[in-house]
Image: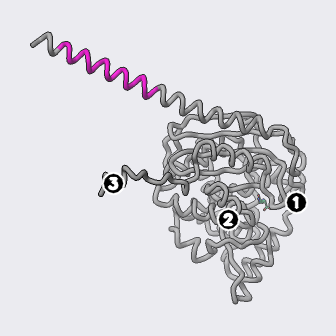
């Protein structure tokens, strides 16, 4: 009997180690699958020459157009990288996602839906015509927190007794998502402050039409500061991963927003994250995403990965050329499209009957 027990114990120990070896082999190959997808996209697009740095903010024209970094963060918090993932660029419009997330968390999903809207404008991100169309009524006028009129309004809605208090909430939220303390790139902030007359006009118009209820110039200044926050590809991918994994930063474990609020953030990103090219982007990738004129794009495959690419040259819609191509390829290789579900087999169906 004692011999039999020992034999059975030995057998189950062998089975357990075989299972462990199998599991770790599976994990290693899944991880190396991510690495090879990231490396393949980097090699394929490294020398792509299309697009041009944004130059309506003079500091952006000075950024090295060759800068190219790709990062994927998987559910275990592992960071898969290729290229330059440490050089900082300004976050620009990607910031709009995280101010919106903060508002949804503090004031509820209906706050932005009622005051700003959650529909695509189909127009440029800084369109004034889109604001006027809403006033005219009769259709065609829409807004959301990811175009400048909606974003400046969103920033004006963050509560605080002073501009500093509002700013600390904004930068604190971005830092929780990134998992490190983020700061403003002062040269970009100065450059954009010196040239943001159009955003000031948008701020005044939004005040005139009752969207902004506080000092519009304070809202524009805070918005300009939030767009000038410095991030590298790793920061952006970690911010994306926090949204991919229920609002919890997969490395620090900090809950940046509650899990039930994440779908609202992702829905607006899917609708309007790449501006007037959002429909085409969603058609090809299925991924909620957001671009910035600093050259970054983040995208989220819910539950699977967060991805970010930084590469300054932009296409005509204001979206990074290399970032769009690299994310499309990596998403395809990793099966990240949430709408792409394999059909159930006939055997499975029959078994369930
Ligand atoms: O307000 C602006 O024009 C910039 N701070 C941000 C624009 C932006 O990133 C649009 N991106 N695609």
Within 10 Å of disc 1 (Cα), the crowding (few <14, some 14-19, many 20+) is few
What's the distance in space between the residues labelled 1 and 3, CA to CA? 68 Å
Q: Is residue 231 at all visible to an observer of this figure?
A: yes
Secondary structure under badge 3? helix
From what the image shows, is residue 74 above or below residue 223? above
Highlighted range, magenta:
6-24
From what the image shows, is residue 8 above or below residue 283? above
Nearer the N terminus, badge 2 or badge 1? 1
Q: Is residue 38 left or right of residue 254?
A: right
Residue 26 placement (x, y as % from top left):
48, 30
Contact? badges 2 and 1 (CB < 8 Å) = no
Secondary structure under badge 2? helix
User: Which residue corresponds to the image point at 50% horizontal and 37% vertical from the top-left?
Assistant: 76
Within 10 Å of disc 2 (Cα), the crowding (few <14, some 14-19, many 20+) is many
Residue located beneath label 1 in the image:
194
What's the distance in space between the residues labelled 3 and 2, CA to CA? 42 Å
Residue 53 placement (x, y as % from top left):
87, 51
- For the residue pair 67 and 349, the one nearer the viewer reads as 349
């Amino acid at each position: 009997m004692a011999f039999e027990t020992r034999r059975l114990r030995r057998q189950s120990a062998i089975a357990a180690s075989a299972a462990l070896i199998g599991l770790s082999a599976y994990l290693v190959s899944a991880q190396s699958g991510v690495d090879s997808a990231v490396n393949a996209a980097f090699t394929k697009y490294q020398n792509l020459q299309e697009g041009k740095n944004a130059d309506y903010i003079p500091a952006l024209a000075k950024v090295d157009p060759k800068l190219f970094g790709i990062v994927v963060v998987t559910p275990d918090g592992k960071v898969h990288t290729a290229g330059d993932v440490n050089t900082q660029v300004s976050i620009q419009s990607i910031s709009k996602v995280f101010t919106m997330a903060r508002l949804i968390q503090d004031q509820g999903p209906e706050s932005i839906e009622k005051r700003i809207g959650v529909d695509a404008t189909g127009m440029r991100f800084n369109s004034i015509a889109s604001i006027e169309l809403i006033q005219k009524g009769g259709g065609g006028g829409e807004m959301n927190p990811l175009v400048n009129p909606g974003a400046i309004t969103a920033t004006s809605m963050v509560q605080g007794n002073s501009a500093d208090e509002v700013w600390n909430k904004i930068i604190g939220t971005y830092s929780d998502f990134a998992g490190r303390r983020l700061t403003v790139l002062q040269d970009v902030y100065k450059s954009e402050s010196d040239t943001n007359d159009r955003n000031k006009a948008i701020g005044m118009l939004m005040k005139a039409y009752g969207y902004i209820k506080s000092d519009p110039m304070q809202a524009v200044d805070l918005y300009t500061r939030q767009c000038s926050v410095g991030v590298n590809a790793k920061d952006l991918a970690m911010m994306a991963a926090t949204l991919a994994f229920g609002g919890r930063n997969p490395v620090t474990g900090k809950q940046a927003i509650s899990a039930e609020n994440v779908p609202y953030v992702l829905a607006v990103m899917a609708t309007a994250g790449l501006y007037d090219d959002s429909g085409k982007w969603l058609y090809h990738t299925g991924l909620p995403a957001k671009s910035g004129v600093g050259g970054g794009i983040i995208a989220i495959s819910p539950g699977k990965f967060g991805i970010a690419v930084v590469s300054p040259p932009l296409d005509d819609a204001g979206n990074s050329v290399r970032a769009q191509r690299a994310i499309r390829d990596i998403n395809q290789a990793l099966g990240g499209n949430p709408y792409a579900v394999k059909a159930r087999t006939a055997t499975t169906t029959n078994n369930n009957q």
